[in-house]
Amino acid sequence: MERLTKSTAGVWGLAAALVGVLAGQVTSIFTGPSSSPMDAVGGFVIDLTPPPVKDWAVATFGTGDKAFLLFVIAVAVAVLGWLAGILQRRTGWAGSVLLAGLGIGSGLIAATRAASSPTSLVPGMMAALVAVLVLRWGVGRLRALDGAANASVGEPSRRLLMIGGAGVAIGGLGLAAVEGVVRPTAVGRPPIDLPTPVSTSSLPPGLESEITGLTPLRTPIEDFYRIDIALSVPRREAEDWELVIDGMVRNPFTITFDELLAMPMVERDVTLTCVSNPIGGPYVGSTRWQGVLVADIIRRADPEARVEQVLSSGADGFTASTPLGVMLDGRDAMIAVAMDGQPLPRVHGFPARLLTPGLYGYVGATKWLEKLTLTTFAESQAYWTRRGWGEQGPVKTATRIDVPGNDLSAGDTTIAGIAWATHRGISKVEVRVDQGPWQEATLGEEVNADYWRQWSLPWAATSGTHQITARAIDGAGDVQTDAIQDVVPDGPTGYHVRTVQVG
């Protein structure tokens, strides 16, 4: 009776692959999260993903897109592991070569990532070694049983199959445990002493205290959206952090975190939004930021006359191309070290990040900032502009209807939401029910031109199905366009329309 069937070989291949990846992930705890096999391959996949696929992932899974990618990678590893077991059964060596190639390949990818170090190869090598050893031992033992003339038919093979199944369970559950325990340890807020800013601002009362369901005037940090290319949060400590300023400048220099904190700091209330935020979408947030004005850094560097952009680089490999004129036109573009009065959380860019009022994040909000290179657009292209996105990325006028919900009772209610036209401000919001006339909403107090505004309009709701449409007018008097455009290449346009059923 054959003990080494396709199924038993597949189980051992699956066990070997999962246990190998688990070994690599555990090793990466000591060599850095970006060196882990899962993160290295995931980052490589993100870099190769076409913009339409990326937008589909964000639209479908939201901020869970990275978790979905890791799940897909784990499934792919499981499938390849099963295949490796079957190949090992057939040839005695091909499965080992497949698993070794996967592990070594992940190590080589990790070694080429932006945050790589001399030890980045180690987790992939460990994954390859453990996977091959487990596969060769399990399949080899079963092959030996098949070749033994006097071997008992049942018990040894059942025992080996149970060991293989246990390996699958250990690998899968262990991998889930490592992902669930190790990753969250990288998202805290490191304790640093923030200097007192030389200038600050104050927020007026928000309309959310009067209108249930309306977006708060200030976004709680735990609710602030996160869209970036980092599968694992880069671990940078304040004492090791440096910012390099180079490129087409007469005075290139490097500053430490302590030197950055010693510079004049400002606090500003600013709204940030992602270029991938669909009309009415959630990827927009507003809070108070503290940091150093980028203009001070640039003037110290003394750029050459031909400079057109500031190419900012993050520890995750992301780059953004911000027009030099935007950095120097008087807006509060800053290297931020704090949000909402607290040091930046790691997931939002600790130790320091760039933010540029009036520009989408992909051209002006680099997290885990490490370098500012002054250059031309022809000389250097940023991460997303190389993938077909627009070069400039100004934030478009937009509004979102927050309330009422889709189902409500007839009678007096309130239509309310938020509107933003960062760096231009909001002067008016208008609302239309069905095909009725546009009605001017009441605006909440203005914080500044870089911050969203709340708005509301009373409505006597009647029974039936209704369409509520909202549009905003910016501070220059320009009306939000009704032309429908997708998020590619430089942000969506169109009115937010909500259909409600009134009972």
Image (cartoon, rainbow, N blue to C red):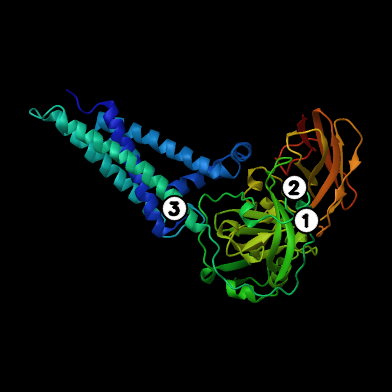
Question: Of tags 3 and 2, which is closer to the observer?
Answer: 2
Residue count near mark 1 (Cα–Cα under 10 Å), binned few <14, some 14–19, many ≥20: some
Task: State the image coordinates of residue 65 (x, y, percent, origin top left).
Answer: 56, 42
Judging by the rendered image, the residue that carries numbered circle 3 is 181
Q: Which mark is residue 206?
A: 1
Task: Confirm whether residue 428 shows in the render.
Answer: no
Q: Amino acid at mark 3?
A: Val
340 displayed left or right of 135? right
Q: Residue at x 74, y 61 (%)?
A: 269
441 displayed left or right of 20? right
Q: Are the residues flagged by discs 1 and 2 in contact, CB closer than 8 Å?
A: yes
Task: State the image coordinates of residue 95 (x, y, percent, origin top left).
Answer: 30, 35
The mark tally for this picture is 3
Q: Which mark is residue 214?
A: 2
Q: Amino acid at mark 2?
A: Leu
Kindly report the distance in space between the C-alpha atoms of the residues bearing marks 1 and 3: 37 Å
Q: Closest to the observer: 350 or 287?
A: 287
Query: Helix, strand or loop at disc 2?
Result: loop
Query: Helix, strand or loop at disc 3?
Result: helix
N-terminal-most mark, 3 or 2: 3
Q: Amino acid at mark 1?
A: Gly
Task: State the image coordinates of residue 104 (x, y, percent, origin top left).
Answer: 37, 47
- In the rendered image, which quarter contains the C terminus? top right
17 displayed left or right of 372? left
Residue count near mark 2 (Cα–Cα under 10 Å), binned few <14, some 14–19, many ≥20: many
